[in-house]
Image (cartoon, rainbow, N blue to C red):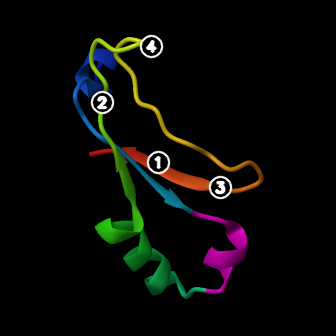
Amino acid sequence: MGSPDSLTLMPLKIARYDDEDMNKRSDEEQKTYKITDSNYSAYPFKAKLDPSNSWTAPFVTNHKYRIYFD
């Protein structure tokens, strides 16, 4: 894995991924869900703002999320 600097300027992608919803899907539907871009919200990297060099995203408690960097 690269250094934290390797994530600079990469957007953060987040999709809701609750067990209750995923358990209703077949394995193939789950795979399709994971790779479909429209299921994710993208949060851009915020350079030189307060707080500096970060991503800002809202989360709702008691939910699970799938998160990755583009």
The residue under label 2 is 45
Callout 2 secondary element: loop
Could you tell me which residue is drawn at 68 percent across and 50 percent down? 60
The residue under label 1 is 67
Q: Position of residue 54 (x, y in %)?
A: 39, 22
Measured along the vertical axis of the image, is residue 48 above or below residue 19? above
* Residue 13: mark: none
Q: Position of residue 3 (x, y in %)?
A: 31, 17
Cα distance in 3D space between marks 3 and 2 = 22 Å
Mark 3 or mark 2, whichever is nearer to me: 2
Could you say which is closer to the camera, residue 49 or residue 70? Answer: 49
The residue under label 4 is 51
Measured along the vertical axis of the image, is residue 37 above or below residue 51? below
Q: Residues within 10 Å of mark 4 (few under 14, many from 20)?
A: few
Q: Position of residue 56 (x, y in %)?
A: 46, 32
Q: Is residue 22 magenta?
A: yes
Could you tell me which residue is drawn at 44 percent across and 85 percent down? 28
User: In terms of sequence position, does the residue under pointer 1 or pointer 4 come before the other?
Assistant: 4
User: In terms of sequence position, does the residue under pointer 1 or pointer 2 come before the other?
Assistant: 2
Cα distance in 3D space between marks 3 and 4 = 25 Å
Q: Position of residue 21 (x, y in %)?
A: 65, 77
- Find the magenta span and give its range: 17-24
Q: Amino acid at mark 2?
A: Phe
Q: Quadrant of residue 65?
A: bottom right
Q: Residues within 10 Å of mark 2 (few under 14, many from 20)?
A: some
